[in-house]
Image (cartoon, rainbow, N blue to C red):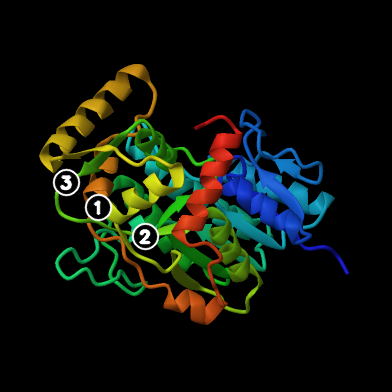
Amino acid sequence: MNTKRILITGASGFIGSFLVEKALEKGYETWAGIRRSSSREYLKDERILFIDLNFADKEKLTVQLNEFAAQHRKFDYVIHNAGATKCLDPADFDKVNFHYTANFIDALKDADCTPEKFILMSSLSALGVGDEVNYTPICVLDKPNPNTAYGRSKLKAEEYLQSAANFPYIILRPTGVYGPREKDYFLMLKTVKSGLDVGAGFKPQHLTFIYVRDLADAAFLGLESAVGNQAYLVSDGDVHTDKEYTRLVKQVIGRKHVLSLKIPLWLLKGISVIAEELSKLTKKPSTLNRDKYRIMKQRNWECDIEPLKNDLGFSPKYNLRRGLEESVEWYRDNKWL
């Protein structure tokens, strides 16, 4: 019996590297899709095989997949995790997250390389703002209305995938993903360690999280299940206010007292615009920008994961405390904190 062959795109990134680890753990022949220029810092296992796919050119990508299948055989499974979360030009979100995904889907079909299952790593942002009055959870069947360039690009990719005939897929829309190697939540941990807690706005936020290893588990449950052509929201099932989250971070880091500052949303918006304009001068994407402001402004990130539990048997192993403890330990061991 042949070992199942899996391709994981965006493998050099935070989530991608954990997906690769999970694939190896499960015994797959694991191909990491990365650019030649990408770091292999977290892809050092000698069992990993590498491939550099040209998502920008559908015809060349089709040839690549044809040649690969002729030399080996086609990929049994694909997790399309590649994407952009920060861009200098908002139009690049569409180019990378939508057009490259469409090219990939078309090339797989044209090369007669349609996999047994294709997992698209999307985002909760594809659905847009949740109920900020009664704080009812966001549901997978809610009408999408993304309010960020990032979210709109992810939704376009989802819709293209859903329109593909005879192409078995699962779409995962994770909420905030954290864990070792992650850099955005890490900045918050670092700030609290320094004695400062900076919050956005005065109205309470309802936050949700998913630990990266649990997200990897969800992806492989989707791959290996008989379920197809469905979308799922992914979180650990818990909800935390912004104050509760900060309190937990303080406990895990061991910081008893911090100076708490709440930045009014109007001021945060102005800072975000300035930061985005400066990034165009420095040619480096800014962590704070108009898109990020809309995400920070959002008050309700509660989401319903019952379909994920019922259909795929998902049961998260990490609550927020355990995930933070493991993350902080890694940050300290690797001299980040």
Q: Disc 2 vs disc 3: Cβ atoms closer than 8 Å?
A: no
Q: Which quarter of the picture shows residue 29?
A: bottom right
Q: Nearer the viewer, residue 57 or 20?
A: 20
Q: Residues within 10 Å of mark 2 (few under 14, many from 20)?
A: many
Query: Measured along the vertical axis of the image, is residue 232 above or below residue 158?
Result: below
Residue 237 shows in this picture:
yes
Residue annotated with mark 1: 147
Query: Measured along the vertical axis of the image, is residue 35 above or below residue 232?
Result: above
Looking at the rendered structure, the kind of residue marked 1 is Asn
Q: Residues within 10 Å of mark 3 (few under 14, many from 20)?
A: some
Query: Dot 2: what SS?
Result: loop
Looking at the rendered structure, the kind of residue marked 2 is Thr
Query: Dot 3: what SS?
Result: loop
User: On the picture, is 125 further left or further right than 109?
Assistant: left
Q: Whole-Å distance between the Cαs marked 1 and 3?
A: 18 Å
Which residue appears farthest toward the front when viewing the image? 256
Query: Measured along the vertical axis of the image, is residue 56 above or below residue 153?
Result: above
Label 2 vs 3, first from the N-terminus: 3
Q: Nearer the viewer, residue 203 or 234?
A: 203
Which residue appears farthest toward the right when viewing the image? 1
Looking at the rendered structure, the kind of residue marked 3 is Gly
Please provide percent x and percent y for residue 331.
54, 37
Q: Nearer the viewer, residue 125 or 109?
A: 125
Residue annotated with mark 3: 201
Q: Whole-Å distance between the Cαs marked 2 and 1?
A: 19 Å
Q: Residue at x 68, y 45 (%)?
A: 32
User: On the picture, is 109 further left or further right than 48?
Assistant: left
Residue annotated with mark 2: 208
